[in-house]
Image: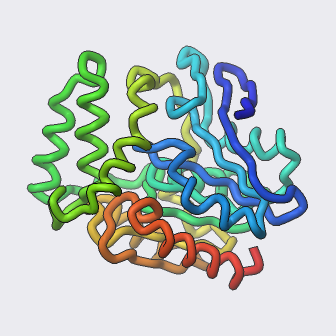
Amino acid sequence: MPVLELPGAGLRYETAGAVSDPALLLIPAGIATLRMWDEQAEALAAQHFVVRYDPRGFGGTSHDFSVPFANHDDAIALLDHLGIERATVVGASRGGALAIDVALAAPDRVAGLVTIGARIGGHPDVAPTPDEQHRMDAVDAIDPLTDPAGYIRLETALFAVGTGRGESDLDPAFLARAHELAEPNIAHVADDGEQVPLDPPAAERLGEIAVPTLAIVGEHDLTPFAVQYEAIVESVPHATGIRVAGTAHLPSVERADEVGAALRRWLDEHGL
């Protein structure tokens, strides 16, 4: 797998498809790696040049966290490295926040934007439900430095299950897949470093996003993500929203075929 060497990092990435086709940049959730797009990559590559990578602190990317960095600059550097003038940027959760930041930091490089259970940089805190808070507290009670595997496993279960259902309601194969995707990040729990945020933050600038935008959220995603999904749909001028039934924070994994088909239809409708 190729690596892009940047100051303080070696960005692990993969490509598929013809370089002459419209480009897609896929950014994973914080509880996953670039492998979370395995179920969509082949179908997308039939008509697109598909690029996916692990941001700093995740998966196969190496990270010297003594070096300050901006995640959106890393994404743009990867586009530069591959000679991509414009791409549709697709991001899940933390990767969704990064995708939004890229669209705002370099609007001339972004042809379309897709967010899945996305965070929004600078968005005000949203109170979880009491049950959600109880489960979040259980994750926070684990010291990731002394029990990194336990921390990652419980955090992954929190997001995979979501709200309004329990683990027994999930397909065991999906839950196993969620844990498999998160496992490589156990090695990165101590990674942090000085991240340079987008300034002004995305929460104050959603109205500036002028490209076609697709926002996706799972029916059972945690309250803060459901609220931020609504903010994207309401504030981005050309946004379309999709709620995926029977899923939580990882709809593109839990309902891979359904979400992949919806994404391809949307790309086709907008000529992306």
| Residue 244 x %, y % | 39, 75
| Residue 11 x %, y % | 67, 31
Residue at 62% across, 53% down: 26
| Residue 56 x %, y % | 56, 31
Q: Residue furthest front?
A: 173
- Answer left or right for 110 relative to 84: left
| Residue 39 x %, y % | 55, 59
- Answer left or right for 114 relative to 186: right
Quadrant assignment, res 126: bottom left
Residue at 39% across, 34% down: 183
Q: Nearer the viewer, residue 152 or 57?
A: 152
Residue at 74% across, 48% down: 15
Position of the C terminus by quadrant: bottom right
Residue at 31% across, 34% down: 152
Q: Is residue 235 above or below residue 153?
A: below
Quadrant assignment, res 171: bottom left
Q: Residue furthest bottom?
A: 269
- Answer left or right for 129 relative to 186: left
Position of the N terminus by quadrant: top right
